[in-house]
Image (cartoon, coloured by chain):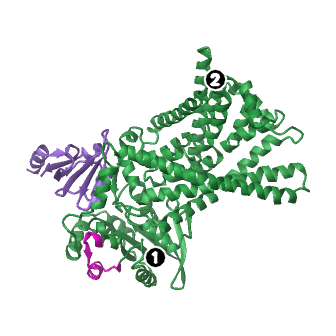
């Protein structure tokens, strides 16, 4: 099968074009020579199946950023039959250098000058025929967003694919390092073919920036935007999530329970409470992920994410992170899973890992449910909001502490030099495609892991079969008992320890697990817990719940995004250790002060 | 005496970070390590090019500068390594 590699600088609309070409039927795959996964899609072209690979956006083929190295290694080990180069027409004078670098590799090239519509607005005119002749490469003007120029370009690609690729001789690589004559050739081609008005005026972007990046107004507006996004995701997401949960419940009661009625009790429990509940847990994340990425596509494609980086960088730089990391951290307060997936916008791997280490400490909406239950059971209506607020402060504090402690280990040498793109309107198609691709990615990567985890916890809390589920006689109860010496110093009793084992799957089921453990529910449960615990024990339990492993889905995402078991284990160990330490300090400190 | 010439240029030049919003300048020299230097080159930073300071973020945050038609964000630490002549 012939292969087409998509190449270009960041912000050229490369991914939009990729989505258009593959119609969203893309998959993630590994390639020889590189450690990161690349998106690729197979399409029919001129009667043959062709594979299109979306390479990361790069500025310079000789650069040393992670992305630039990935592209170089990919080209070295997987010489494509054709490289499709996407250039941003509005910035043609500086993007031409990348094209000339690629031309020296002696591979088949087809060039698309994208954002032709925007260039026209700026008054930039390109003599495509002349440029094509000077460079001896087929060149096409294109608007990937609106689809104009697309059919002609496809025909040219089909034609170019008929010729075998010359391949890449080793001597070309050394030759490539001589960058000097690229500059002269750049000047020659541009001089003859491109006319750029002396000063570009993009009045709208200027006006928007003067407000959105205002020295005083910029930050409040940024927080307002984040708050609205956050609210938006949950106002739309929670009813859908509730609906999905009801649908799964209905299916269980009307179809599965009668169907499996004949099976032995234990097998029934394993199938329904183990596997089926695992699938339902996975499904509950789908609406949140879709909505998150719909909104993220909007923030990212509009150009606002780069602005957020500008606004927040002063603080984040001190933590070894950058402004975009802050956006993800805030999003983590909704749900950690999509926030972790969103860190893919970061180019530097070290910084991405550091951000991924910090995000699981964000107090997500599932943990909030546990805290609301406990504060209602143990604190007065007046004290409850203060207690909740203090937990948010602990969450921020833990995030800052983690970043400060680990920034030396995940030191990134990536300079913070970013291009600030003009504001653009993202198209609905782009947004929907993004949401869909991310959900599919999550389902493929996380389903098995989450279902296996749910089944494991079911087994722990139901074996041996003679014991009362989740009681002290089950495996979980025995583990809870064995770990008691570890949890006693932080004021967490055996029942709560078992609930914490459930909480490892998802915080949403902690209260449900307590109901099973105490054989009580609703007000009776909160009454019993309120009687059994004092506020110091309850607060210590909440601190532990806040900081230890958020949920199986987060662990699965950490693993699938980092692809480093060592990193996932570090994240697990650090959050567990920090949770224990903070709870210990709090519990013993409060007891020492006489509470 | 090119070394001496460079020195005299460097002495009359100020750092990019010292410009105020609205100032324009010509890039005199770039003293950056290789990775940063390559990135700056790719984004259009060249000796002799016109550069305009658009804005500076609060709390010693990054700078927004314009070269030709491209707007670029960079931190002050990085901007210190770029010397310019104010015009």
Query: Can residue A339 be spotted in the picture?
Result: yes
Quadrant that contains the N terminus of chain A = bottom right
Chain letter for the residue marked with disc 2 in the picture: A
In the rendered structure, the answer to whether residue B82 lies left or right of residue A278 reads left
The colour assigned to chain A within the rendered structure: green
Check disc 1 and report the residue beneath it: A81
Query: Which chain did the image draw in purple?
Result: B
Q: Which residue is nearer to you in this view: A446 or A302?
A: A302
Q: Which residues are magenta?
A: A120-140
The reply to whether discs 1 and 2 touch (Cβ–Cβ < 8 Å) is: no
* Quadrant where the C terminus of chain A is found in the figure: top right
Tell me what residue is drawn at x 47 percent, y 74 percent: A4
Does A159 appear in magenta? Answer: no
Label disc, if present, on residue A536 of the rendered structure: 2
Where is residue A71 drawn, in percent x and y?
43, 62
Q: Is residue A96 shown to the viewer in this render?
A: no
Judging from the image, mark 1 belongs to the subunit labelled: A
Percent position of residue A530, x then y: 71, 27
Mark with earlier residue (1, 2) = 1
Q: Nearer the viewer, mark 1 or mark 2?
A: 2
Element carrying mark 2: helix
With A532 as the anchor, is A124 left or right in this view?
Answer: left
Residue positioned 43% across, 46% down in the render: A224
Instruction: From the top left corner, tell me how far across and down residue B60 is, in percent.
Output: 30, 39
Q: Alpha-carbon distance for marks 1 and 2?
A: 67 Å
Is residue A78 or residue A483 the one in the foreground?
Answer: A483
In depth, the one of A3 and A365 nearer the eye is A365
């Amino acid at each position: 099968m012939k292969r087409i590699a998509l190449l270009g600088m960041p912000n050229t609309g490369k991914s939009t074009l990729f989505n258009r070409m593959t119609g969203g039927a893309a998959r993630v795959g590994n390639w020889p020579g590189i450690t990161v996964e690349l998106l690729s899609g197979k399409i029919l072209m001129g009667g043959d199946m062709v594979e299109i690979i979306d390479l990361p956006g790069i500025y310079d083929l000789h650069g040393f950023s992670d992305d630039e190295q990935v592209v170089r290694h990919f080209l070295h080990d997987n010489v494509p039959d054709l490289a499709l180069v996407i250039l941003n027409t509005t910035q043609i004078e500086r993007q031409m250098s990348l094209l000339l670098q690629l031309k020296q590799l002696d591979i088949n090239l087809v060039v698309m000058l994208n954002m032709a519509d925007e260039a026209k607005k700026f008054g930039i005119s390109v003599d495509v025929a002349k440029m094509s002749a000077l460079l001896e490469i087929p060149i096409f003007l294109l608007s990937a967003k609106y689809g104009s120029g697309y059919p002609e370009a496809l025909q040219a690609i089909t034609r170019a694919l008929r010729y075998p690729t010359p391949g890449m001789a080793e001597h070309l690589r050394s030759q490539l390092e001589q960058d000097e004559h690229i500059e002269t050739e750049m000047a020659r081609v541009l001089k003859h073919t491109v006319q750029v008005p002396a000063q570009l005026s993009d009045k709208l972007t200027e006006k928007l920036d003067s407000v959105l990046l205002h020295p005083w107004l910029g930050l409040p507006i940024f927080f307002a935007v984040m708050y609205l996004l956050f609210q938006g995701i949950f106002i739309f997401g929670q009813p859908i999530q509730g609906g999905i949960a009801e649908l799964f419940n209905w299916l269980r009661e009307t179809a599965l329970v009668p169907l499996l009625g004949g099976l032995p009790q234990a097998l029934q429990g394993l199938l329904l409470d183990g596997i089926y509940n695992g699938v339902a847990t996975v499904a509950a994340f789908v609406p949140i992920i879709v909505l998150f990425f719909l909104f993220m596509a909007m923030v990212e494609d509009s150009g606002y994410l780069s602005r957020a980086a500008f606004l927040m960088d002063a603080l984040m730089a001190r933590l070894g992170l950058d402004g975009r990391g802050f956006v993800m951290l805030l999003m983590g307060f909704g749900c950690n899973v999509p926030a972790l997936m969103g860190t893919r916008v970061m180019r530097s791997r070290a910084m991405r890992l550091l951000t991924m280490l910090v995000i699981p400490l964000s107090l997500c909406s599932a943990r909030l449910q546990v805290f609301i239950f406990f504060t209602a059971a143990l604190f007065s209506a007046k004290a409850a909001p203060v207690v909740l607020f203090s937990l948010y402060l602990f969450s921020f504090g833990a995030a800052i502490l983690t970043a400060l402690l680990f920034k030396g280990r995940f030191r990134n040498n990536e300079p913070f030099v970013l291009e600030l793109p003009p504001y653009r309107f993202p198209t609905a198609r782009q947004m929907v495609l993004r949401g869909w691709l991310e959900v599919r990615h999550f389902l493929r990567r996380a389903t098995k892991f989450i279902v296996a985890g749910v089944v494991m916890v079911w087994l722990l809390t139901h074996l041996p079969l003679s014991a009362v589920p989740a009681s002290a006689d089950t495996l979980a109860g025995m583990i809870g008992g064995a770990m008691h010496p570890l949890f006693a110093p932080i004021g967490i009793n055996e029942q709560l320890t078992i609930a914490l084992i459930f909480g490892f799957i998802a915080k949403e089921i902690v209260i449900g697990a307590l109901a099973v453990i105490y054989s009580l529910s609703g007000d009776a449960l909160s009454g019993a817990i309120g009687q059994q615990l004092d506020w110091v024990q309850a607060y210590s339990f909440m601190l532990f719940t806040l900081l230890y492993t958020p949920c199986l889905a987060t662990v699965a995402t950490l693993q699938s995004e980092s692809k480093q078991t060592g990193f996932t284990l570090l994240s697990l160990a650090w959050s567990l250790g920090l949770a224990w330490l903070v709870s210990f300090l709090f519990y013993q400190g409060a007891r020492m002060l006489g509470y | 005496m090119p070394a001496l010439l460079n020195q005299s240029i460097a002495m009359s030049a100020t750092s990019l970070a010292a410009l105020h919003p609205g100032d324009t300048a010509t890039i005199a020299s770039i003293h950056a390590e290789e990775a940063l230097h390559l990135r700056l080159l790719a984004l259009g930073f060249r000796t002799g090019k016109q550069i305009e300071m658009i804005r500076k973020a609060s709390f010693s945050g990054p700078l927004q500068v314009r070269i030709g038609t491209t707007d670029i964000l960079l931190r002050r630490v990085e901007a210190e390594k770029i010397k310019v002549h104010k015009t």
